[in-house]
Amino acid sequence: MKAIRTIEEYLLYLEEKGFHLKEDARGFIAFGQQYAGASEEVVIYAIEWTLKMQREFDGSFFMSLVESLTAEKIQTRRQATMFFEQKGMI
């Protein structure tokens, strides 16, 4: 599998795996990224963990993750995983 670098690539990857986000979820993702000033990587982590924890896309949960990851200056998958472990999410 090639490296996923953009939100759009990640959403396409999810679709290939059979998980389709509705158009309003996509709009919410774009809004959340802009609102929090988050990087593509942080938004991808937030989408991934939202789906893992909620088993569906939950906009408020996603927004909380994006804000938390951005506030903590998370930049890598390893940092995100450690953050989620510290918060007792995994």
Image (cartoon, helix red, strand yellow):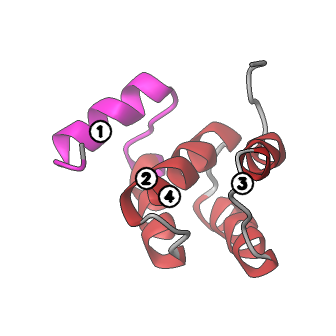
| 33 in magenta | no
Q: Which residues are magenta?
A: 70-89
Callout 2 touching callout 4 (CB < 8 Å): yes
Callout 1 touching callout 3 (CB < 8 Å): no
Residue type pointed to by label 1: Phe
Residue type pointed to by label 2: Lys
Cα separation between marks 1 and 2: 15 Å
Residue type pointed to by label 4: Leu
Q: Earlier in the sequence, mark 1 or mark 3?
A: 3
Cα separation between marks 2 and 3: 15 Å
Q: Earlier in the sequence, mark 4 or mark 1?
A: 4
Callout 2 touching callout 3 (CB < 8 Å): no
Q: Which residue is mark 1?
A: 83
Secondary structure under the numbered disc 4 in the rendered image: helix
Q: Nearer the viewer, mark 1 or mark 2?
A: 2
Q: Which mark is residue 52?
A: 2
Name, please, the residue furthest toward the top.
2
Residue 54, image quadrant: bottom left
Secondary structure under the numbered disc 3 in the rendered image: loop
Q: Earlier in the sequence, mark 1 or mark 2?
A: 2
Query: Which image quadrant: the C terminus?
Result: top left
Callout 1 touching callout 2 (CB < 8 Å): no
Q: Which mark is residue 20?
A: none
Q: Nearer the viewer, mark 3 or mark 4?
A: 3
Cα separation between marks 1 and 3: 28 Å
Q: Earlier in the sequence, mark 2 or mark 3?
A: 3
Q: Which residue is mark 3?
A: 18
